[in-house]
Image (spheres, helix red, strand yellow):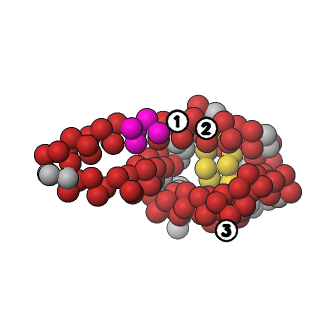
Amino acid sequence: MSDYRDVYAPGAYNEAAFQGTLTRRIFAFIIDYVLVGLLVLLAGVLVFFLGVITLGLAWYIYPVLGVLIAMIYFGSTVGGASQASPGMRMMGLILVQQSGRPVDFMTAIVHLVLFWLFNSVLTPLVLLVALFTNRNRLLHDILLGTAMADRSAIQARY
């Protein structure tokens, strides 16, 4: 028997825990991508020196370096114990699954890849979806059964 609660069950959470998250989510995105950019810059310098040592072999990592860093960053933070990236934590947000289970590493990666996919096709218009869905969910949240919630409201529940 599991101790997880269905996030969408009646009375599972106060709906206020899911309101007002869209603006904070946008700021969390900006913070996270500044941090990812800094990590990519540092990794780029490291790969440069590795490339010198390996006579250019390590430079083949450059085309996928940003994607790898972002996947590791979001997979380990959103899929970790805090269930939130540093930007989400600064904005007081947490990613929850419909089943109530913690978000794992692979779900965090799929969440990120679907975000990239929908954002590349729909550009900023993808944010309009949140204005018309319950709990301000985006397309990738709907497909994965996740929602962005206020951290303090969710933690007070448990």
Q: Which residues are magenta?
A: 37-41
The image shows residue 11 at horizontal and vertical percentages of 78, 54
Task: Give the secondary structure at mark 2.
Answer: helix
Task: Answer above or below: position of 153 versus 143.
Answer: above
Quadrant in the rendering for residue 40: top left
On the image, numbered disc 1 is attached to which residue? 34
The residue drawn where x is 34% and y is 36% is 42
On the image, numbered disc 3 is attached to which residue? 143
- Looking at marks 2 and 3 on the same chain, the residue that comes earlier in the sequence is marked by 2
Amino acid type of the residue that numbered disc 2 sits on in the rendered structure: Ile
Marks 2 and 3 sit apart, C-alpha to C-alpha, by 23 Å
Marks 3 and 1 sit apart, C-alpha to C-alpha, by 27 Å
- Comparing 113 with 24, the one in front is 113
- In the image, residue 99 lies in the stretch drawn in magenta: no
Left or right of 29, for residue 61: left
How many other residues sit within 10 Å of disc 3, few (<14), some (14-19) or many (≥20)? few
Task: Answer above or below: position of 142 versus 22.
Answer: below
Task: Give the secondary structure at mark 3.
Answer: helix
On the image, numbered disc 2 is attached to which residue? 30
Task: Answer above or below: position of 101 versus 44.
Answer: below
The residue drawn where x is 51% and y is 57% is 108
The residue drawn where x is 68% and y is 41% is 26
The image shows residue 78 at horizontal and vertical percentages of 51, 49
Amino acid type of the residue that numbered disc 3 sits on in the rendered structure: Leu
Amino acid type of the residue that numbered disc 1 sits on in the rendered structure: Val
Tell how many labels: 3
The image shows residue 57 at horizontal and vertical percentages of 20, 56
Residue 97: tell me if it is visible: no
